[in-house]
Image (tube, rainbow, N blue to C red):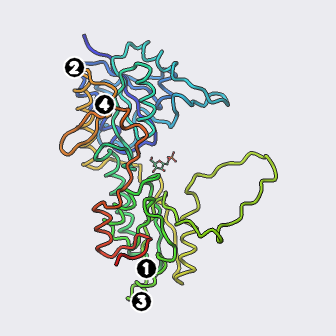
Amino acid sequence: MKKSIGVLTSGGDCPGLNAAIRAIGKAGRNRANIIGFLDGFRGLMQDRTMRLDDASLSNILTLGGTILGTSRDKPHRMPIGGEVRDMTDAMVEVYNHHHLDALICLGGGGTQKNALRLKEKGLNIITLPKTIDNDVGLTDVTFGFDTALEIATDAIDRLHSTATSHSRNIVVEIMGHKAGWLALGAGVAGGADIILIPEIPYDIQQVAAAINRRQRDGKRFSIIAVAEGATPIAPPEEEKPVKKKKKSRAVEIAPSAHVGHTLELTNQLEHLTGLESRLTILGHLQRGGSPSAADRLLATRLGAACMDLIEDGVFGVMVAARGETYAAVPLEEVAGVRKNVPLDHDWIKAARKVGTCLGDAPME
Ligand code: F6P
């Protein structure tokens, strides 16, 4: 008898999701009926579905985004009519209602944790690692990253000619959440002069000094690639701004953690270097459009491997990329493990060797 398998995409979209959905559907076409749940865990809770058949799987390999739609909703913290509720049991009911043999969740770090919650409720869950941030633990790489890397590198390439023509500093803000893979990779590949990543808190004086050294060498422009999650080193105690006491209990809207810090950095650099400075925020451009060949390949092989694991009855795992093959990593091991750039990573070593400033004191 054919199996029944559900698929959903959760968290921020990225190029390669449709390639993975297609691989799952095509690899499973003779052994399973496959249904897609729309808009991540919210669609699972609401039992909103689409059939993943030949017609819906056609012509999606090269398509960006996800044909299933996505959301950042979590099973245990679902906003519903002004309240936040734990809807995990409602999802278990939908799973049982469809007599599913397995549910495949395509997502990043947050999705691994949410998938584990469903696994702990007794469901057969299997996940694939996707995100442009490349920050999911225990996999060599995530799909979506390669495409975003190309886009960010191309942006840095283009910023070079305008920065040179105007003798300016151009700060380019690159996504990546709390990891520096994208900014570091694109910065090295695009030849950025300064690269700032969350893993190495930066000293603004060191950044300005690097730009001023370049000016003394006759280079009157600099490209500064900054990860959205990069932070300055903590100021000494006496320089810390005194926190004002809150006067009222009015509702405060928390700004996204990184908003504004790259603009402040750009203004500081103009002041410290005397060069006109501009900011470019690449934002969601990095997540849009057709996946690269490498992402199509990765998504296709992980999607196909996922169907083999289901066939073998292997559940409660993430299908991780390991060299030219894959590994089934227990969700307990991957949930909550963020992969940051190790300080001894080759990309960091290479950047330093070619003279790129990483915002800390120059190496002797
Ligand atoms: O996780 C992918 C990512 O693009 C991060 O790099 C970024 O911090 C975040 O998502 C942006 O999220 P949203 O699309 O919800 O604004």
For image coordinates 52% across by 66% down, the residue present is 233
Helix or strand or loop: what does disc 3 sit on? helix
Q: Earlier in the sequence, mark 1 or mark 2?
A: 2
Helix or strand or loop: what does disc 1 sit on? helix
State how far apart marks 2 and 4 are (Cα): 14 Å
Give amino acid for label 4.
Answer: Leu
For image coordinates 26% across by 20% down, the residue present is 313
Residue located beneath label 1 in the image = 210
Give amino acid for label 3.
Answer: Arg
> Would residue 179 be found to the left or right of residue 249 on screen?
left
Q: Earlier in the sequence, mark 3 or mark 1?
A: 1
In this rendering, the label closer to the viewer, 1 or 4:
1
* Quarter that holds the N terminus: top left
Residue sitting at the far front: 237
Q: Which mark is residue 216?
A: 3
Asked if 189 appears above or below 126 in the picture, the reply is below
* Tag 1–tag 4 contact (CB < 8 Å): no
Q: Earlier in the sequence, mark 3 or mark 2?
A: 2
**Crowd rating for badge 4 (residues with CA inside 10 Å; few <14, some 14–19, many 20+):** some
Q: Which mark is residue 30?
A: 2
